[in-house]
């Protein structure tokens, strides 16, 4: 029997708001334990939640970025369950009336082609507290940190449209880029501001039946999501082939052992409307204002980069993949270098260097102004490409301008025709065998002679001028 996977994702995204969802405590879960708390986020009896307008706006921007239809009216429910990280016994979430519905994203699948994957809904909810497990002496203890309690979240629930781990990876990358562009979240799985649960089932290929699913948690990177889905698909196929039933439950991904392990049975408590939080009403006027605040999104920007900067499609997609990178690229181009030179140097040299130095385009020591200055010198033949790489490396180590680095390091290119003519003639005279090889049709001899000229000038000669002068000199000889 041939099987296919049926995969849906539930993605929690932490909104980058100044305060928590229902109180004025700082939204800073990583601070010292329990310092950002009040009666509301400690969930003390009688404390009345106050909904954050900033959180509603950022959640709405997420909905728009994911092509969702924003509901005119949405509401919070009490999602009842009992666990130590939720001592009040329920979580405020939007189970019955979510903020946004019927969204979609175009994402690259396993075959590399883009296809539309549907989003069932996007709802707002509060995060729970954090359990910290420690050993005191020989006794295991569990502590509760309420800094995270009440952090504003959106949960994005997809339709079961994915058929492979590659589909899921493509979707998550597209989703992360869309949300980052809005500024609603940094969507860092490593830092915990984006958490992904995968619901996975299998069925006979060609069937439209939805079988029992298994939920997999504890994945802190897109790569881990891919590996966990692949493992779970093979595990479920093995179960079916051996006659073992698939049971609805939750599993954890172990990134060290590369296996999923059973965690608990799937619990679904009641959800009842919450009487304390007012309904959210978004008028058409307000909705239009939100749409006008939505920035140019990655696909739109990529198309503009192709049209306005004559970039190849693949290069345009790379330059528009992240908002801070696209802004960096355009800032460089506005300062003088050609768009193709800027895109090449950013992708081939700047991005690897930023990764090595733990920097991003937004906080790069090599600012757009400094990189543009370097590239203008390169395009004006003041320095050659080899020298430009050396200058770029030094720009990460100090704040000197590229012009000053060139002067102090002696990188300025030799372009004087008379000076180069003398060097070329000297090289020809010193290498008669290479000249003879050239006359006998061995064109690689030109490359050797070019190398000798560059060596004689310590790499400072203008390669274009050298080649012109060398070709003329060889023809004359």
Image (cartoon, rainbow, N blue to C red):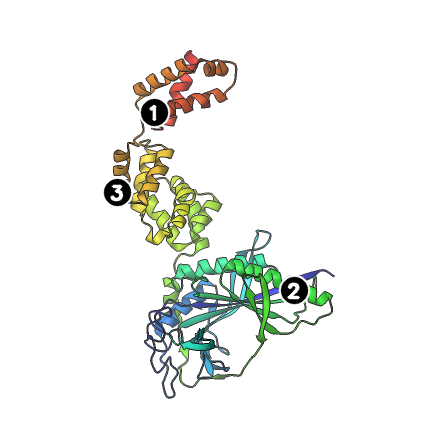
Answer whether residue 423 is visible to the viewer in this image. yes
Q: Are marks 3 and 1 in contact (CB under 8 Å)?
A: no
What residue is shown with label 1?
457
Q: Which percent across, then down, holds residue 111? A: 60, 52
Q: Which mark is residue 333?
A: none
Give the distance between the C-alpha atoms of the residues marked 1 and 2, in whole angstroms: 64 Å
Neighbourhood count class around disc 3 (C-alpha, 10 Å): few under 14, some 14–19, many 20 upward: few
Answer whether residue 303 is visible to the viewer in this image. no
In primary-sequence order, the first of circles 3 and 1 is: 3
What residue is shown with label 3?
400
Say which quadrant the N terminus sits in.
Answer: bottom right
Give the distance between the C-alpha atoms of the residues marked 3 and 1, in whole angstroms: 25 Å
Give the distance between the C-alpha atoms of the residues marked 2 and 3, in whole angstroms: 57 Å
Residue at 33%, 20% in the rendered image: 420
What residue is shown with label 2?
235
Identify the element where label 2 is drawn. Answer: helix
Q: Which percent across, then down, holds residue 121? A: 51, 70
Residue at 57%, 66% in the rendered image: 8
In the drawing, does residue 184 fall left or right of residue 4?
left
Identify the element where label 3 is drawn. Answer: loop
Q: Quadrant of residue 256?
A: bottom right
Number of numbered callouts drawn? 3
Residue at 34%, 44% in the rendered image: 333
Identify the element where label 1 is drawn. Answer: loop
Residue at 52%, 16% in the rendered image: 441
In primary-sequence order, the first of circles 1 and 2 is: 2
Say which quadrant the C terminus sits in.
Answer: top left
């Amino acid at each position: 029997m041939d099987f296919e996977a049926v995969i849906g994702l539930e993605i929690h995204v932490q909104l980058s708001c100044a305060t928590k969802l229902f109180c004025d405590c700082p939204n800073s879960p990583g601070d010292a334990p329990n310092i950002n708390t009040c009666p509301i986020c400690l969930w003390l009896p009688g404390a009345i939640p106050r909904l954050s307008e900033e959180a509603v706006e950022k959640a709405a921007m997420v909905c728009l970025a994911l092509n969702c239809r924003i509901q005119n009216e949405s509401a919070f429910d009490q999602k009842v369950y009992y666990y130590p990280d939720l001592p009040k016994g329920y979580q405020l979430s939007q189970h019955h009336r979510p903020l946004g519905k019927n969204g979609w994203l175009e994402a690259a699948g396993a075959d590399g082609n883009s296809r539309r994957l549907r989003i069932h809904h996007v709802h707002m909810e509060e995060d729970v507290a954090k359990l910290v497990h420690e050993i005191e002496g020989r006794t295991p203890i569990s502590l509760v940190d309420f800094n995270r309690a009440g952090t504003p979240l959106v949960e994005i629930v997809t339709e079961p449209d994915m058929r492979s781990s590659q589909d899921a990876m493509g979707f998550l990358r597209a989703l992360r880029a869309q949300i980052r562009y809005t500024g609603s979240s940094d969507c860092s799985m490593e830092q915990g501001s984006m958490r992904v649960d995968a619901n996975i089932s299998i069925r006979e290929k060609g069937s439209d039946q939805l079988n029992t699913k298994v939920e997999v948690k504890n994945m802190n990177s897109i790569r881990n999501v891919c590996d966990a889905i692949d493992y779970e698909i093979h595990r479920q196929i093995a179960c079916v082939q051996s006659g073992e039933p698939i049971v609805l439950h939750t599993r954890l991904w172990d990134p060290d052992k590369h296996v999923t392990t059973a965690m608990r049975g799937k619990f679904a408590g009641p959800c009842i409307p919450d009487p304390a939080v007012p309904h959210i009403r978004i008028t058409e006027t307000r909705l239009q204002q939100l749409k006008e605040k939505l920035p140019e999104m990655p696909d739109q920007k990529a198309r503009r980069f192709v049209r306005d900067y004559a970039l190849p499609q693949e290069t345009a997609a790379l330059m528009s993949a992240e908002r801070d990178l696209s802004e960096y690229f355009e800032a460089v181009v506005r300062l003088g270098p050609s768009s193709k030179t800027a895109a090449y140097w950013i992708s081939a040299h700047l991005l690897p260097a930023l990764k090595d130095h733990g920097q991003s385009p937004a906080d790069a020591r090599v600012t757009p102004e400094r990189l543009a200055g370097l590239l203008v010198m390169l395009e004006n033949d003041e320095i050659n490409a080899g020298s430009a790489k050396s200058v770029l490396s030094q720009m990460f180590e100090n704040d000197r301008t590229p012009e000053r680095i060139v002067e102090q390091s002696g990188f300025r290119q030799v372009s004087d025709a008379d000076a180069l003519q003398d060097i070329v003639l000297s090289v020809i005279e010193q290498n008669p065998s290479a000249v003879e090889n050239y006359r006998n049709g061995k064109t690689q001899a030109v490359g050797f002679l070019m190398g000798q000229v560059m060596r004689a000038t310590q790499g400072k000669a203008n390669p274009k001028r050298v080649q012109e002068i060398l070709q003329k000199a060889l023809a004359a000889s």
